[in-house]
Amino acid sequence: MAELRAGIDAVDAEIVRLLDRRASFARRIGEFKQQRGMAVYAPARERVVLDRVTALGEGAFPKRGLEAVFREIISSSVSLETSLKVAYLGPEATFTHEAALRSFGTSIELQPQTTVAEVFARVERGEAEHGVVPVENSMEGAVTHTLDELMNSPLKVCGEVYLPVSQNLISAEESPDKVSLVCSHPMALAQAASWLRRELPGARLEEVESTAEAARRASVQPGVAAVGSALAAEAHGLKVLARNIQEARTNTTRFIVLGRSWAARTGKDKTSVVFSVKDRPGVLKEALSAFASEGINLTRIESRPSRKRAWTYVFFADFKGHPDEEKVRRALEGLEEHCPYVSLIGAYPEVPPEAS
Ligand SMILES: O=C(O)C(=O)C[C@]1(C(=O)O)C=C[C@@H](O)C=C1
C-alpha cells in the first residue's frame, strides 16, 4: 500500500509540474490575444483540445473523467488569461447554472441574472463577456423569450450544451402526503404534470419564476414542495421526496452560449440563422431548397411572430456546417435570394445530444 501510494505521489508531482508548464503557455496565449484585442474564450479550440485528450486516453482513466479534468484545466487557463465574466439565467442551482459550469468550469466568475433579457443586456453592455440561456426543451419546445431576444440582439451564439433534465419533488417535509402546495417554473410544472396529477391530486400548483425560487419557497414555507433539480435541493437543504418525476426519461434541455462573435470552424459545427419570407405560396419551401440543394442537414426549424407587424413570422433554423464552408456560404446566398431578411446568429462546435 505505502509503495503504491508513493507511486501516486510521484505521478501527482509530475502532473502538477506539467500543469505549471501548460499554464505558462496559456499565459503567453493570453498576452498574444490581449495585444490583438482577441476574445480569450475560444470554444472551437476548446472542443479540439477536449476531443484530442479524450482520444489520447488509453482507457485506464475514464474518458468522461478526462473531459471533466481538462474542462477544469482549461477553466483555470482562462482565469490566468483574463477575469472572464459569464452571465446566466439564475438563480444559482438551476439547470442553466449547471449548463454554465459545463461550458466554462468553476474558475470563472458566474453572474446569475433574473431574466433572459438581463443576460442579453449584460453581455451587450460589456459587463460580462458571455451569457448562457436555455433555448429549447425536448418535451416542451422552444424557450420563446430566448428566441425573441436573439432576433433583436447583436450577440452571436458561440456554443451549445445539452443537459438531461431530471425533475424531482423536493421539500423540507418528510413525505409527499404533507405537501399541499407545489411550486415551480411553468416549464418544470409542465414536465411533471402527469406525475403530480397522479401522485398529489389534492395539492395546489403555483407558477414561480424559477426552480431555484421554488426551492427557496419550499425551504421557508411548511407544506410546500418544489419541482426542481437535486442541485437545488442540496443548495436549500431540502429532501428529495421523489426522483425523476418528469414526463420522459429522455427529457433534455439545450442551452446556448452567447458572445460577441461566433466560434471558429472545427469541422463538426452547427450554424443558426433567422430569416423572414415574403407573403406568397410556396415561399418557405423555396427558401429551404437552398439547404437541400447543397445537401445541408437542417437540425431544427422554428417560427416566431415577427413582433413588427401582426401575422408576420420569422424562422429560426439550425443546420450542420460552418459559415466558413463553401457550401454553407452558397446556401446562405440562396436563402438571401428568397428572403427579405436573413441574419446569421451563430456558429459553434456541434455537441451530439447523447454526449452531454
Ligand atoms: O488556445 C487558446 O486559445 C487558449 O487560450 C488556451 C485554452 C486552453 O487552456 O487550452 C484556454 C482558453 C481557450 O478558450 C481555449 C484554449
Image: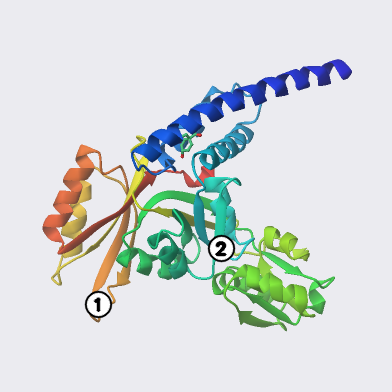
Q: Quadrant of residue 301?
A: bottom left
Rendered view: 68 above or below 225: above
- The residue wearing badge 1 is 308
- The residue wearing badge 2 is 112
Cβ of mark 2 under 8 Å from ligand 1: the answer is no
Q: Nearer the viewer, residue 327 or 296?
A: 327
The answer to whether mark 2 and mark 1 are in CB contact below 8 A is no
Q: Circle 1: is it few (<14), some (14-19), or many (20+) Cα within 10 Å? A: few
> Looking at the picture, how far across and down is residue 202, in whole percent?
72, 84
The answer to whether residue 250 shows anywhere in this view is: no
Is 229 situated left or right of 179 in this image? left
Is 263 situated left or right of 114 in this image? left
Viewer-nearest of labels 2 and 1?
2
Q: Quadrant of the N terminus?
A: top right
SS at badge 1 = loop
SS at badge 2 = strand
Q: Quadrant of residue 112?
A: bottom right
Is 151 situated left or right of 223 in this image? left
Residue sitting at 32 percent across and 70 percent down? 304
Q: Circle 2: is it few (<14), some (14-19), or many (20+) Cα within 10 Å? A: many
Residue sitting at 74 percent across and 60 percent down? 234
Rendered view: 233 above or below 329: below
Is 149 situated left or right of 290 in this image? right
Q: Quadrant of residue 64?
A: top right
Cβ of mark 1 under 8 Å from ligand 1: the answer is no
The answer to whether residue 220 shows anywhere in this view is: yes
Q: Disc 1 residue type? A: Lys
Q: First in sequence: mark 2 or mark 1?
A: 2
> Looking at the picture, how far across and down is residue 327, in whole percent?
20, 40
Q: Quadrant of the C terminus?
A: top right
